[in-house]
Image (tube, coloured by chain):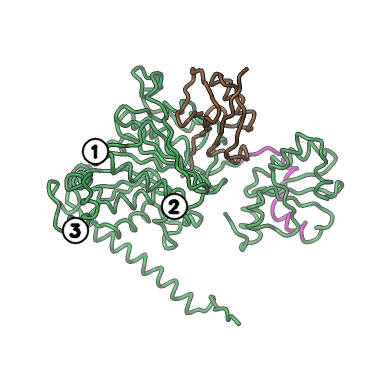
Chain colours: A brown, B green
Amino acid sequence: MMKARAVISISGAKDLSGEKETQIIVPSSVSRQDLLKDLVSRFSLQAIESIITLAVNEEYILDAEEINLKNGDQLAIIPPLSGG
Amino acid sequence: MVIEKDFKDPRILQLKEEIKNLKLLLCQKETELSELLKPVAFSCCHGPSMKGASKEKLSATEISRYSRQMLIPKIGVKGQLKLKNSSVLIVGVGGLGCPAALYLAAAGVGCIGLVDHDCVEINNLHRQVLHSDVFLNQPKVDSAFAALRRLNEEVEFRTHKTQLSSSNATDIISSYDVIVDATDNAPTRFLLNDVCVFTKKPLVSGAALQTEGQLTVYNYENGPCYRCLFPKPPPPNSVKNCGDAGVLGTVPGVIGTLQAMEVIKILTENKGVLSGRLLTYDGLDASFRTFKIRDKSKTCAVCSESPTIKELIDYEQFCGSAANDKNPSINLLNPNERIHVERLAELLKTESENNTFIDVRSPEEFEMCSISKFVNVPINSLFFYNTSSEPLFTDLKLDTEKPVYVICRRGNDSQRAVQILKDLYSHLEIKDVIGGLHSWAKRVDNDFPVY
């Protein structure tokens, strides 16, 4: 399987994952569901799995899409914040 | 040598009390005056603004007052008149609502409504910049009203000292042009979204936690609504609140100010409104990012062409959590596994050497305040030990024979910790302290900090 080296940032979830931005190796072609599953287990985001949103290169990825990734792509995990 | 001032000096205390009373008296008189100045009859915010000022024209004072923003071609007289004849509802007069209200009042929005049922607490003051010491324990809407009126008497302020709910939300919201979501909990966010979809109002939504913030505009010119993005409510306790995770005051300051900016753009019919995009702010990185979020969802439960939700529902039930940012008490242990703070005081006094005392709060909290003889074992580290075979007490150089007493901030985490510890050390007597440090401060040591 082809792989890509992407940069992932996790906003609003630093406490959960302990990380803010890091490089990860991901499959270069993957479904949103599988990528999300991978990221959730990699960064221990189980508690918020059902509500996190995933963006690639600053664009949200919707449910059914197949995602093509290349080196240097920016992944972002954005859980909703509620505080005010 | 520094000579310390004696702050118990009776004259100092007397002056402080007198000044506080004078400030309150001043507020009362200002309220009385503004009542007298109110036009005799107005039915809603779209009526004539305060003192019957003209809707079509700006007065000389108004031109002077707002000249610096009217000089901007995208605002001008036209934009200023639009602001003057508009109304904005700010839901939540806290960390986000205070700066948003401040800038909207300063900018000359004709009518500003404020909704909040809370009173001012001392732990609000580092970020909720309209409130001050004088208004501690007073309703936030009254405190904000006093501060805003001092800033701009031309604005008509409406205060709604109530918790927004399915039964009152439509009535309150329908008389305003734009709604600002400056709330602190998921049920109210869903409620606001649905009302705004049903009443066709743009919703300027902000959120802030720790050092990060988010901003977007929902339900604007056929853009997505909150449910298009988040069809499901967050699992209870999965989204942290400011009371637990903390928040740096400048972060809601930034986001609340940006909310005011979006409101001004909407009201003055400028382009570039943050609809279909989400802005994130990270204060520590000093970084702003804008994400393209999504178009309106064709399957959205409220805003699609075939909605499944056509009227307001019970949002606390829907989210499985209360419409506030307070934590409910839990009850996991039997009464014989728990002690009261008075018993803890006795133990610490007479038998402290024969027992182990554990405080399971975070290191940051432990550093702020703790009871002597307690060792800090954050509950998160217990979760780690729970799933590994490493001997916790050996690591911590704790006795594995003595009874253990566990405390936390409010008496919830201490119960969870007792359950974990019992799995690890089933032979030990392990108990928690009911009500935690809040009870300790209330019933044993009144000088102990409460946060």
Q: Do discs 3 and 1 belong to a common subunit?
A: yes
> Sequence order check: which comes first, mark 1 or mark 2?
2
Report if the CB atoms under discs 2 and 3 are less than 8 Å apart: no
Determine the residue positioned at 61% across, 62% down.
B446
Residue type, numbered disc 3: Ser
Residue B73 locus on image (x, y percent):
21, 46
Of the numbered discs in the image, which one, if any, rests on residue B116?
none
- The residue singled out by tag 1 in the image is B269
- Chain where mark 2 sits: B
Q: Do discs 1 and 2 belong to a common subunit?
A: yes
Label 2: how many Cα within 10 Å (few below 14, some 14–19, many 20+):
some
In the image, the segment drawn in magenta is B330-348
Labels 2, 3: front one: 3
Residue type, numbered disc 2: Cys
Q: Of residues B370 and B259, which is closer to you in this image?
A: B259
- The residue singled out by tag 2 in the image is B119
Labels 1, 2: front one: 1
